[in-house]
Every structure is written in C-alpha cells, then in structure tokens.
Amino acid sequence: QQKVQQSPESLIVPEGAMTSLNCTFSDSASQYFAWYRQHSGKAPKALMSIFSNGEKEEGRFTIHLNKASLHFSLHIRDSQPSDSALYLCAVSDQGGRALIFGTGTTVSVSP
Amino acid sequence: AQTIHQWPVAEIKAVGSPLSLGCTIKGKSSPNLYWYWQATGGTLQQLFYSITVGQVESVVQLNLSASRPKDDQFILSTEKLLLSHSGFYLCAWRLGGQNTLYFGAGTRLSVL
C-alpha cells in the first residue's frame, strides 16, 4: 500500500515570498503525481500534476518530481493571501484505482 | 451547470441513528466514482470506489457501506452511526483513463 507523507505540517509565509512544499511516497511504480488545494470548508481542487521525472511550471506554480528519491515538491512563487489553504499531494496507487493523499500542509500567507 | 452534486450539505445526527449520503454526477457517461472521508484539517481517506453500476469496492469500511444504484448515483450509508463517523464526506469522479479527480462540495457530518 502506497504511503504518502508531507512536510512541513504547517507553514507561515510572508506575501510575495516563495512557498515550498514536500511530499514523499513509498512506491516508485506510481505513474501520476499531483497537488490539490483545499480552501477552508471547500472541496479539494487539482492544482498541477506530473507523470515523469523533471519539472513543470504553470504560472506561479512549479512541480518537481524525482522518482529515484521518492520525492516530489510544489513551489509557489510570489505567494498571495489567496494561496492560504490546505495543500494535499496525491499519488496514484498501483492498480490505478484512485489517488492516495498525503497528510497535508496548511499554508498561511500573511499580508 | 454543476457536474457533481452532493446531498445533504450538512447533517447533525445522534449516535446509533442511520445515515444516507448521496452524490449525483450529471453529463458524464460511466464515470469512476469515489467516496472520501476527511477529519477536520486532515488528509483524505478513500472509503469506496466504483467503476460501474452495481459494483463497489471497499478500501476502508469504517462500518459504512456504499452502493451505486444508477450510473450517475453513488450512495454512502450506515445503519448505526458512531462518534468517529463525524467529519467531511466527499464524493469524487473521474473518467476512465484519466487521472484528475473532481470533488463535490461535500457533506459535513456531526455525530453527537
């Protein structure tokens, strides 16, 4: 069973700074790696995903994947108060039946 | 128009009482459907998934059951609620062969 852990548990970031979130997983056979964002009281929404080793950038968001290290990360450039949320990383399970979510990182961006 | 609709929005129930939560998907043919549970501020724990009508696989039961009576409907239920059932229940869908999960707005359940 895939195990997915996130660090840190919570983070306070000044507005305009870089936010960096980490996710480790236990099974390198997974094919799909994603970040979801959940604002308080709302449903999670997919932010970005990646399938192979490397880096992918979309606007202020960059995702890095290193399968050999069993690690992927999300970086948010020029963080805004609207980025304050719970961030969940997700990894596909072996059978592709669903996503296994990480433990979550709560991000607060202070104006 | 909203693709996924969950009901009810919130419930306050007594320990030992029954529960039924529902989820309807519109405009998508034969979606894969999922139930997740989330403790306050916590991670998403997958409960059940279904790839076709009448077939439901359990991941973690937590004294709950699920059914898919129609292609566009997924039901989560129990005959006897426990305090530990409190939390946020989320239904999600995705199309076969795709990876992104799309979540409903969720049902917040308080068991007292």
Image (cartoon, helix red, strand yellow):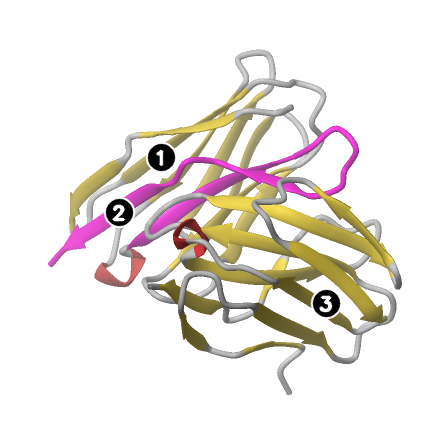
Q: Chain of mark 2?
A: A
Q: Nearer the viewer, residue A92 or A21?
A: A92
* Span shown in magenta: A85-111
Q: Nearer the viewer, residue B45 or B67?
A: B67
Q: Are marks 2 and 1 on the same chain?
A: yes
The answer to whether any part of residue A58 appears in the image is no
Q: Chain of mark 3?
A: B
| Vertical arrangement, residue A19 with respect to residue A4, above or below | below
Q: CA distance from mark 2 to mark 1?
A: 9 Å
Residue to which mark 3 is pinned: B74
Tag of residue A107: 2
Residue to which mark 1 is pinned: A21
Assign the magenta stretch its main secondary structure.
strand
Q: Is residue B86 shown left or right of residue B20?
A: left
Q: Is residue A107 shown left or right of residue B1?
A: left
Q: Residues within 10 Å of mark 1 (few under 14, many from 20)?
A: many
Q: Is residue B10 magenta?
A: no
Q: CA distance from mark 2 to mark 3?
A: 32 Å
The image position of residue B14, as x and y in percent, is 40, 68
Q: Chain of mark 1?
A: A
Residue found at x 59% / y 48%:
B63
Kind of residue at disc 1: Leu
Q: Nearer the viewer, residue B26 or A56?
A: B26
Kind of residue at disc 2: Val
Q: Residue furthest front?
A: B16
Q: Are marks 2 and 3 in contact (CB under 8 Å)?
A: no
